[in-house]
Image: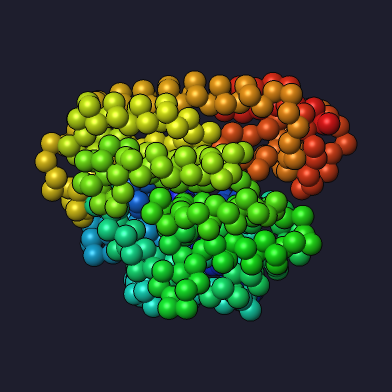
Amino acid sequence: MIIFLETLGCSRNQVDSEIMLGKLVAAGHSITDDPSLAEGIIVNTCGFISTASDEAVDVILEMTAFKQAGTCKRLIATGCLAQRYKEDENLISALPEVDAFLGTGAVNQIVEAVENKSITALTLFPDPNKRPFQDMREQRELTTNFYAYIKVSEGCNRKCTYCIIPHLRGTQRSRPVNDIFKEAATLAQKGVKEILLTAENTTDYGRDFQDGTRFEHVLTSLAHTLEKEHTWIRFLYTHPQTLTIPVIQAVKNHKNICSYYDVPIQHADSSILKKMGRPYKREDLYELFATIRKNDPNAALRTTLIVGFPGETQDDFNQLLTFIKDIRFDQLGVFIYSDSDDLKSHVLKNHVPKEVAEKRHDMIMAAQAKISASVNEKLLGKTFEVLVEENPEQGVYLGRTMFQAPEVDGITFIYGNGLEIGTFVKVRISQCFEYDIAGEIA
């Protein structure tokens, strides 16, 4: 069967999609990037916030057109949306064209779902806590060029009141260290130039182990494992409570680890953080970022915020705005609080009106645009190593530096000719914009 798979949501979902594609190829199926040619269509959904759920339903409905046209014989919905609403009969009845719904713990059953000939909808929702880690004997089908994500753990033990992830993905289970190293080495040998470590909270890695292994051990050993390869190592989704000095020192001590800290703080007002279930205060955040910059002066900082959380007053928001102006993050993303009756935060008082939350979102982004432009101005005249990723037109290439993560950050425009995609070049920065930079080959 010819299979098309659409991935929505986060990097963890992307890894799941690549594992499913690997299992399907191993079972004799082929892959296409054109849904109109597919006999089987899979939508790996996100259901983290309401806008993601709405997008997932829209994409599924879009894919039903191919089934109605007759080419697609089987339509499957997998991932977080299916898991979150598995007991909602309205979802299944609203999407009668879907032949199978698979939860987050059913990745290993994708071949069964594709090949099943049942007339009634197949529903597979095994306990995500019992989902096995990736079988290293099976190959992933990578969907990205020259970079790849590696999940270091599954699930989460945190109790953030705005988050449904522990319910969707189960409790934290750190992956065996040797599996991580083996996969990283395999990816590097296949030509991957950047490996991104991901999890719900990467720096929580090992907290479920009894032998004292923690995330800094993974970083240090992985840096040594890839020492002979020209491969960047980047880690995402750290938690402020477990982003420790040993982790920072591991980054500083190894040139192949990107000096890039993705620290989703969510907010910077202590009272809001407490309502969010985040176990730190505003003062702790100031201290954390000061510590990073003291130990690693060239570090790039990225964060993610939520505005419009229940009970957020104008003063609370002002504290947040002041904080981002003080810290001056290199990169920043902000979400508007998404409410749902299955969240603990749903029962909190004083929900913020949508129009107020949207205004606060715009104010944060306007402030960050100025900060980002100012940060980029300081890069003028400096030379950086850049991974060349695209060649959209003659004389212009697109790439990324160590301080630019794929998909979420700005890019580097490279002016020149004769560059090979998937290689590293030295670029002298001659132009800067709000989020992007540009330069010539040094």
Quarter of the C terminus within the rendering: top right
Way the structure is coloured = rainbow
- Is residue 341 visible to the viewer in this orientation of the structure? yes
Residue 342 on image: x %, y %: 21, 55
- Is residue 151 visible to the viewer in this orientation of the structure? no
- Residue appearing at x 40%, y 50% in the figure: 240
Above or below residue 158? Residue 240 is above
Left or right of residue 411: residue 16: left
- Residue appearing at x 43%, y 62% in the figure: 204
Quarter of the N terminus within the rendering: bottom right
Residue 441 on image: x %, y %: 82, 31
Above or below residue 217? Residue 359 is above
> 339 and 215: which one is in front?
215
- Residue appearing at x 36%, y 23% in the figure: 363
Above or below residue 34? Residue 426 is above
> 175 and 132: which one is in front?
175
The single residue placed furthest to the right in the displayed view is 418
Residue 184 position by quadrant: bottom right
- Residue appearing at x 80%, y 37% in the figure: 426
Residue 194 on image: x %, y %: 67, 53
Left or right of residue 401: residue 75: left
